[in-house]
Amino acid sequence: MVSFMDVMEKAVTGKPCLARDFELKIFVPKLREVVKEYNIKYDSTTIIPSDNSLADDIFEAAFDFFLEVGAYCMDTERIIRFDENEIKKGLKEAPSKALLGEGKDARTLTPRKPEDKTPPWCFLGAGGVPVSSEKIFSSLVEGYASIPEANSITTPALTSAGGLRIRPRSPIEMLGAIRNAVLAREALRRAGRSGLPIMNTLATAESAVALTMALHPRYGLRTTDGYLVAVMDPFKVDFDRLNKAYAVLSLGAPLGICISPLLGGYSGGAEGTAVANAAYHLLATLVSQATWHLPFPLHIKYVCNTTPELLWLISVSGQAISRNTHLLSLNLNYTAAGPCTEMCLHEIAASVITSVVSGLSIEALGVTGGRYEDNMTPVEPRFSAEVAHAAAGVGREDADSIVKQLVNKYVDKIANPPVGKRYQECFDISRMVPSREYIGIYDKAKKELEDLGIAFKRK
Amino acid sequence: MNEKEVVIEKLRSGVIACHKKAVIEAAHEVIKKGLDPVEAIERGISEGMRVIGDRFEKMEVYLPEMMIAANIVEAGLNVLLPEIQKEKLPMKGKVVIGTIKGDIHGIGKDVVAAMLRAYGFDVYDLGVDVPVSKFCEEANKVEADIIAISALMSSTIGGQKDAIDFLEEMGVRRRFIVMVGGGAASPEWARMIGADGYAKTAAEASKFALELIKERRER
């Protein structure tokens, strides 16, 4: 497999290109070409297709696309390309499992297949959504760790440290990253699950310098935590994020790459975004040397991934990757609606069922598009995990019928979704229980799902 | 259809079809035939871009079409604007736009820039990772009406406040309308940092920009 330094050599010697030309003259036409060549078509009557050949065509299209387009290095303004053998070898030698966590909380993340009965990996929490205070941060993480199905934790992001609003690449950000690590580990200890891996370490560290600083073991991070680093849409990498990836890999820790192709953006419609979403796995494997993958395609206007087109493309790209590789892939759900609303739980159920029956594991979640501080509670990831475990082994045709009924309940409200209530408004923080109103909404949503045929493992 | 209408239609349909050569040729035809360049821009080029903007809002076309059409509009304007006296320029206003320092996410900003062009604004795109002083310097240089600042991350959004504070402390804040947006921004945040406007989508941002400029000019 190509080494990180091989990638760097390609980054400094690859074909020079202006960013705008890469976007509009290379990325866009080639993506449209492979969509046409493989005759990939979005079918608005289906959300979870059962057609294996569609999934395989999307994988082939993604392979051809990545072979031709490669990735763009923003710092060197050059294109990083790989030949066919390098891509095939990279996929063959990519990690097929990852041991995460310690002690009784240690688990192995393994790949899944469509309709797999194996319960998905449940990466639960805030999806890096901001919180207003350290108190809220700690309380939420403790709540996430108390969810029995939690395999790993995704923390919120602090917005201030030392009384100052965080600024990137500053000592305030470094302090924020340290506080993120220390507070999260302490909250896990309080919940009695100190061995749980923190897989989005560190949500508060946008810059490489803040991440690498907080990696020091004295702040509580471990090489069995997962470390999440971003790649930019469309197919762009930069030195700051590559520095993060290299730092994590040099410690022998598992590296996750998060990627967010936009429906309506450079990838175009559902078909192009499906191919791009699958192809991002190849980029992350080859360029960033990812251990695990976290794609989260989003709607360019609504900043969620629960519209019918988004669910379709998550399903087909998930099936493409899970059928044709052993890569470890999770889908991150972003809802339009907020906590303490029926719509939010319907969106979660639709997204989780789609991901799980399509061969993916889950990260849950970014609520209300991740836009509002404190707009999240432990109820949404708990509900996500319960649905995820119940959906394992459900057939794609049955799941398609269930998800369509769920989508019908909220699709008309996607453009103007209810923001819902903040953590402190719908959760008793001192007793760590949801409000009576929220419990009622949660019970109703579970009953609706049971009526649709979802059999919960835990009542 | 008379000669004028034919040329205006060529401009409009050329932008809609993303046909750069046709738009440039039609723009030269406007000059050669002595037609009114202001009318040619308003009813031809800008109208074509508005159609693209509407189609993007309905997700009938996507960001690449918006970007390509915006580039074609610029090419057409480069031919016609030198023919127009400054006081008769048909532009709705000047916008300096960029993603704040420390943040390299550009797509949201690109969408808003393209949509503002569709609505007839003269847009100066500073790119990503833009220092606060650069917004101020460029806005002063081009005599901008609006400064639009994007930030995607909760860790970079503080830069929007820094930019507004910088303008305030340089004594030029009142000269400009300041709009903020991006994944981490919200109406509450915009109010808290003293921005004049916030919008969730590119179309809302463009409509809001028009309203803010109208309000300011009526004052």
Image: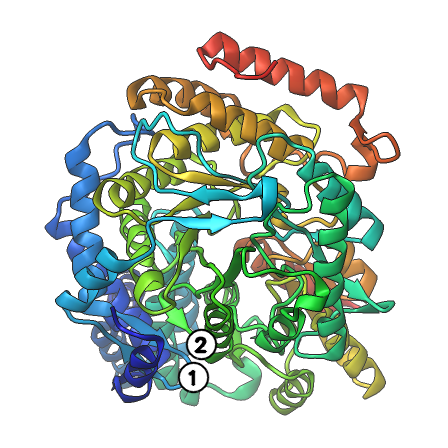
**Disc on res. A75:** 1
**Residue A108 x %, y %:** 45, 43
Q: Are marks 2 and 1 on the same chain?
A: yes
Name the foreground residue: A287 vs B102.
A287
Q: Residue at x 26, y 70 (%)?
A: A70
Name the foreground residue: B83 vs A261.
A261
**Which residue in the protein does label 2 denote?**
A238
Chain ID of residue with mark 2 = A
Mark 2 / mark 1, whichever is N-terminal: 1
Residue B30 in view here: no
The crowding category of the residue bearing disc 1, from other C-alpha atoms within 10 Å (few below 14, some 14 to 19, many at least 20), is: few
Q: Quick check: B192 left or right of A241?
A: right
Chain ID of residue with mark 1 = A
Q: Quick check: B151 left or right of A187?
A: left
Where is B200 relative to A104, above or below?
below
- Give the secondary structure at mark 2: loop
Q: Residue at x 80, y 19 (%)?
A: A436
Which quadrant is home to the C terminus of chain B? bottom right
**Residue A159 x %, y %:** 75, 61
Q: Residue at x 44, y 18 (%)?
A: A405
The amino acid at mark 1 is Asp
Q: Quick check: A377 left or right of B150?
A: right
The amino acid at mark 2 is Asp
Residue A233 in view here: yes
Where is A367 relative to A262, above or below?
above
Examine the image and state in which quarter residue A342 appears. Answer: top right
**Residue A39 x %, y %:** 13, 44
Q: Residue at x 49, y 77 (%)?
A: A243
Check contact, mark 2 vs mark 1: CB within 8 A.
Answer: yes
Colour convention: rainbow
